[in-house]
Image (cartoon, rainbow, N blue to C red):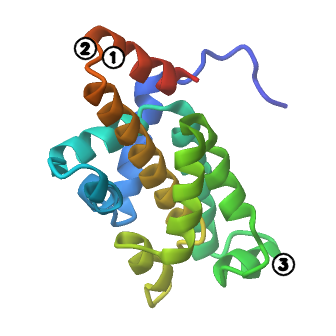
């Protein structure tokens, strides 16, 4: 039975665990930011890699993203260790094409950033850009059934967030209003 009397896990602990797991699985913030840059540069000639890194960092502050990453990577790791029951073990280990739960978890964490994030997620899931392709095709005993889709989600969210912040600056919104909008997105 679950212990409902325990204090909730502090958000900084969850965020740090999320960042560490992503790093442990061989993905850097810069890898994700590179995808964001490639998705957004044609819409903003002055785009910098630092803006993309900052956007990825803001997305990783969102609890829904953190929870999805923690669950997905844990399932990938359990599959690598052969600790799942059959037939789930085989389905996740081979990244069964009709499984879909990996995409469902990742897609669920995209909705907070709107239609740009949703369509970008779909594109990235099919195109397999950058580190996503490396994860999807990595030979050996590593299982990235969930991770590749989660990276799609993070990159899609960061791209959408960045597109909205760029538009806010183009419309010359005050810094306080831009910051408020950004905070509302992360809290929703």
Alpha carbon of mark 3 to alpha carbon of mark 2: how far? 52 Å
Left or right: where 161 falls relative to 101:
left
User: In the rendered structure, which disc, 1 or 3, sits on the residue that comes first in sequence?
Assistant: 3
**Vertical side of 42 occupied by 83: above or below:** below
The label shown at residue 87 is: 3
Measuring from the top left, give residue 63's x and y in whole percent.
Answer: 54, 32
Nearer the observer, 76 or 53: 53
**In the rendered image, is residue 106 in sight?**
yes
Please identify the quarter of the rendering in which residue 85 is found.
bottom right
Q: Residue drawn at (54%, 37%), measured in percent from left and top?
A: 113
Measuring from the top left, give residue 25's x and y in whole percent.
Answer: 40, 64
Considering the numbered disc 2 on the image, is that residue within a helix, a strand or a loop?
helix
Furthest residue in direction front, as rendered: 171
Q: Residues within 10 Å of mark 2 (few under 14, many from 20)?
A: few
**In the rendered image, is residue 77 in sight?**
no
**Vertical side of 14 occupied by 116: above or below:** below
Q: Are marks 2 and 1 in contact (CB under 8 Å)?
A: yes
Quadrant for the N terminus in the image: top right
Tag 1 residue: 179
**Vertical side of 35 occupied by 47: above or below:** above
The label shown at residue 175 is: 2
Measuring from the top left, give residue 41's x and y in whole percent.
Answer: 26, 56
Q: Residue drawn at (50%, 25%), measured in percent from left and top?
A: 185
Q: Are marks 3 and 2 in contact (CB under 8 Å)?
A: no
Task: Tell which tag, 1 or 3, sits nearer the viewer.
Answer: 1
Considering the numbered disc 3 on the image, is that residue within a helix, a strand or a loop?
loop
Q: Are marks 1 and 3 in contact (CB under 8 Å)?
A: no
Alpha carbon of mark 1 to alpha carbon of mark 3: how far? 47 Å
Nearer the observer, 20 or 185: 185
């Amino acid at each position: 039975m679950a212990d409902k009397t325990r204090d909730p896990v502090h958000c900084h602990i969850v965020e740090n665990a999320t960042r560490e797991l992503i790093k442990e699985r061989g993905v850097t913030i810069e890898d994700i930011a590179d995808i964001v840059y490639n998705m957004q540069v044609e819409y903003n000639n002055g785009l910098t890699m630092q803006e993309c890194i900052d956007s990825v960092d803001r997305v990783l502050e969102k609890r829904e993203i953190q929870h999805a990453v923690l669950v997905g990577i844990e399932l990938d790791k359990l599959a690598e260790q052969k600790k799942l029951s059959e037939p789930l073990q085989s389905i996740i280990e081979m990244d069964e094409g009709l499984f879909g739960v990996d995409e469902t978890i990742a897609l669920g964490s995209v909705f907070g950033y709107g239609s740009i994030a949703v369509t970008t997620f779909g594109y990235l899931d099919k195109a397999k850009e950058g580190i996503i392709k490396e994860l999807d095709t990595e030979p050996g005993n590593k299982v990235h059934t969930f991770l590749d889709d989660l990276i799609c989600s993070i990159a899609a969210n960061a791209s959408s967030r960045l597109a909205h912040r760029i538009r806010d600056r183009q419309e010359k919104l005050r810094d306080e209003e831009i910051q408020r909008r950004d905070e509302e997105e992360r809290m929703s």
